[in-house]
Image (cartoon, rainbow, N blue to C red):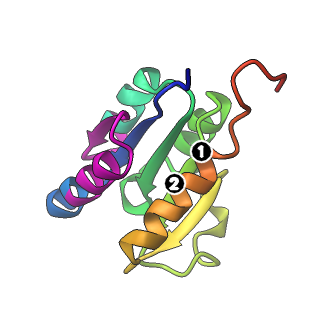
Amino acid sequence: MLVPPSFLVAERDPSLRQVLAEITADSFPSAAVYSARDETEAVANLPRLRPPCVAVLHWSILDQGSATLARFHEAGVPVLLTSAWDPDSIAGAGPASGKLKKPFDLHEYIACLKELLATWPAPGTPD
């Protein structure tokens, strides 16, 4: 039996946060989808994420920047970092498994989530 994924969508814009959470839930029907409006809420939700999982963090919520990304990295949670800035401009933000520039197509967003989930080892296989 496959374990359902879990996701965290952290975005300052409430409308975009809701849309991303809804499209994530629709695309992964058995998944647990959590949302956060700022960095504090995102970090507070970190213990709720169970593998396989992905955190979608918007660059603008990261007041602590690389320290927060490092916390997710240390917890083994892949981060899809979104930003209106060019990925090269936010390259020094810290460890992120993927970057997605706004505005992005929702199909591209879901493809990135699937790609990051695919990095998890299959159940019963060594890491």
Q: Residues within 10 Å of mark 2 (few under 14, many from 20)?
A: many
Instruction: Report which residue position mark 1 lands on.
Output: 117
Magenta-drawn segment: 19-40
- What residue is drawn where x is 47% and y is 44%? 55
Q: Callout 1, which amino acid?
A: Leu
Whether residue 9 sits left or right of residue 88 in the image: it is left
Q: Are marks 2 and 1 in contact (CB under 8 Å)?
A: yes
Residue 64, how many percent across, how many down? Answer: 48, 46
* Label 1 residue SS: helix
- Find the distance from the CA under tag 2 to the CA under tag 1: 6 Å
Foreground of the two, 93 or 52: 52
Q: Quadrant of the N terminus?
A: top right
* Label 2 residue SS: helix
Q: Callout 2, which amino acid?
A: Leu
The image quadrant of residue 2 is top right
Q: Quadrant of the C terminus?
A: top right
Whether residue 103 sits left or right of residue 50 in the image: it is left
Residue 14, how many percent across, how many down? Answer: 16, 57
Instruction: Report which residue position mark 2 lands on.
Output: 113
Foreground of the two, 39 or 125: 125
